[in-house]
Every structure is written in C-alpha cells, then in structure tokens.
Amino acid sequence: MIFATISDEAGKIQLIEAIKSCIKPHIYRRLLTVQLSAEGKKVSELTSIFKVTPQTIRAFVHAYNQGGLEQLLPDKKPGRRPRLHLTTEQWTEIIHQPPCSFEKLNTLCQNWTLKLLSNYCQQYHSVKLCPSMLWYILRQHKINMGRSQLRITSPDPEYTQKRDRTEAIKKKPKPWN
C-alpha cells in the first residue's frame, strides 16, 4: 500500500490551506487525493471516489511524497510561441546594420546570416525562431537576403540624412544641360 506522508503539522496545515484556496478543479482533486491518502484511504477506495485509474492516484501520491505541493501542480504547457511583430522598415533597419554592431551577438561578422538573425531575435526580443522561420518571415516582408553586399555606413547619427541629400542633389537636373 502506498500512502501520502505529511512530515509535520505545518505540512498538514499547508495542505488544508491549499485545498481551501484552490480554484481549479483538477488541482483540487489532486490535493484532496493526497489528503485522503494521508488519512489512510486505500488506492482502491480513492479510485472509486474520484473515478480515475489507480495509476493516476499513485502518481499524485508519489509526486507529493517526492516534492510536496509544488510537484502536484501541472507543468506549464508550452502553448503558442510568442510572436515577433516587426514592420518591414524595422527589419530592413536591422539588416542594414552589421551584426558586429550588436553587443549581445558577440560576433565579428559583417554580414547577416539566418542563424545570426535567429540569435539576434533570441537575444534582443526573447523570441526563439529557427532560421527557416526567419527566412519565411523575411519573404513575407519582401526582404531578399540574397548575396551579401558591402554597405557603407557611418557612426555619424545624421549620416542617412546627409546621404539622402547628396542623392537628391545628384538626381536634380543640371542647369547647364
């Protein structure tokens, strides 16, 4: 016979308080099973009371005996993975910077790979994405990684504005033509 063992009076009080404060029926059933087992009810009796298999009763009792109340709580189910909501502009801004400019990546690479992007998402956004999923996301945003190209950047914060101005000047028609 297997019975739940409550080590001291404090453990018994803690179990009773947990039963009183429990709002989820499946956890309430587990707690009540442990309490009745500690009072001397046999597995066969608990099986007929709670309409579960003897294996389930034994699993609850073993879990309680090994780790207390915390072991009776179910593990957090994974559920849906967190999503990464970045706009096309945000993605292109990330990709236009070299990976070595991000401290947490700890790399000397100048060009992005899908694996580095995956690492970036995990380090900076706490979202774990596999490289193939990143490829799919980038395709949705119509961003083609293709072959890497050398991009000229500058630490000057006004660099993009200056570059845009010079490109606009180059496009203007020349007065002497």
Image: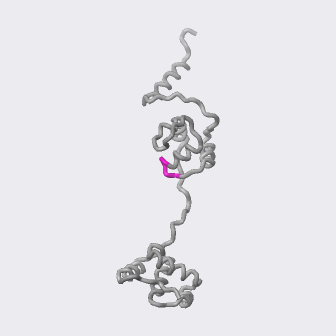
174 up-or-down from 112: above or below: above
164 up-or-down from 49: above or below: above
Give the residue at x 56% y 47%: 118
- Front residue (pair 42, 46): 42
Residue 99 drawn at (x, y percent): 52, 38
Give the residue at x 55% y 29%: 151
* Extreme-top residue of the structure: 176
45 up-or-down from 65: above or below: below
Secondary structure that dominates the magenta span: helix
Camera sees residue 42: yes
Camera sees residue 93: no
- Front residue (pair 3, 79): 3
Residue 157 drawn at (x, y percent): 42, 30
Check the image and tell me how it is coloured: one colour
Q: Quadrant of the C terminus?
A: top right
Is residue 108 magenta-colored? no
Residue 113 drawn at (x, y percent): 59, 40
Give the residue at x 44% y 76%: 68
Q: Which residues are magenta?
A: 123-127
- Left of 129 or right of it: where is 162? left
Number of numbered discs on residues = 0
* Extreme-left residue of the structure: 10
Give the residue at x 54% y 79%: 59
